[in-house]
Structures are given as structure tokens and as C-alpha cells.
Amino acid sequence: MSFSYEYLVQFRDTDAAGVVYFANILSICHVVYEASLIGAGINLQLFVDNPNFAVPIIHVSADFYKPLFCGDRVIIELTPRSIDIHRFEIKYQILSNNLSVLATAITKHIVIDPQTRKRKELPEALNNWLIQWGEN
């Protein structure tokens, strides 16, 4: 079951043409990522400042189908998927109120040891998050 989040497009998200600046779609998606972690019971402070693992993003992509304007209320659906024991990806769909697709994005993440920078297995909390919001 995907995680769903309502987002109000902010003035700061837009460019001089009045539409969401292309790079800001990833910031918007990151807001939803954080909300999904909280929704799964993960303490963000402990997640980010964890001495046992870090979860950097290793790939991003986005496609835009219709413009997003300041003041638009959009629905963002987040669906994570395990790639292997070290990596996962998140698919985002940014939808209008009538559920037409405005944009899509994908982020890929890897779990590493913050000291050695070597790959680690996904921690239990992330596996549980994948189960809760992932493709079943």
C-alpha cells in the first residue's frame, strides 16, 4: 500500500515562470519520504544521526507532464521497493486533485556504514517501512 501525502506548492518551490523549478520536485518528494518514515514509526532524529548506518541517495530522475503552480494542492504517492539487501528505490507520483499525473520521480538509496562507507544490509526499521508502504 502506497503512502499518500497532500502537499501545497509553495512560492519557494517555483521559478520566475511561476511553475515548480525542476530541482525542487526532489525537495518536495523528500518531504514525503520523511513523512512516510515518521508514518512508519521511525524517529527521524535517530534515523539521520545514526552511528550504525547512513542512507544516501545514489540516483534520481524526474519526469514532468503538466506544470505545477504556486498554491496547487497536490497528492503525492510514495511507493518504495527493495532492490537488494543494500538498496531500495522510491517511486513518486505527483497527482492533481482529479488524480491526473502531473509528474513522477524516482530516488534510489543505499545503506552504508557511516565510518567505512561500505555497504550494509537494510536495517530492520527500513525493512518494516518497505513492507508497510511498498508494493505488495
Image (tube, rainbow, N blue to C red):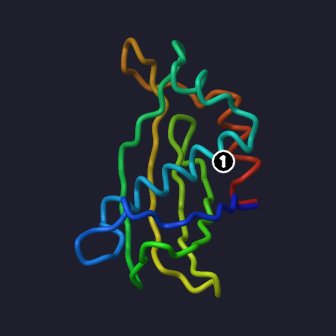
Viewer-nearest residue: 94 or 16: 16
Q: In this view, does 105 lie above or below 39?
A: below
Viewer-nearest residue: 87 or 73: 73
Residue beneath the point at 39% across and 64% down: 11
Residue beneath the point at 65% across and 36% down: 126
- Provide residue 124's location: percent of width, then percent of height: 70, 29
Q: What element carries label 1?
A: helix
Three-letter code for the amino acid on which mark 1 is drawn: Ser
Count of numbered labels shown in the rendering: 1
Q: Which of the image's four quarters has the C terminus?
A: bottom right
- Provide residue 19's location: percent of width, then percent of height: 34, 75
Residue beneath the point at 49% across and 73% down: 71
- Provide residue 59's location: percent of width, then percent of height: 36, 50
Q: Is residue 113 above or below residue 123?
A: above
Q: Which of the image's four quarters has the N terminus?
A: bottom right
Residue beneath the point at 52% across and 76% down: 72
Mark 1 surroundings within 10 Å by alpha-carbon count, few (fewer than 14), some (14 through 19), many (20 or more)? many
Residue at the farthest left position: 16
Q: Mark 1 points at which residue?
A: 36
Q: In which quarter of the image is residue 116?
A: top left
Q: In this view, does 109 lie above or below 9?
A: above
Q: Quadrant of residue 24?
A: bottom left
- Provide residue 82's location: percent of width, then percent of height: 59, 48
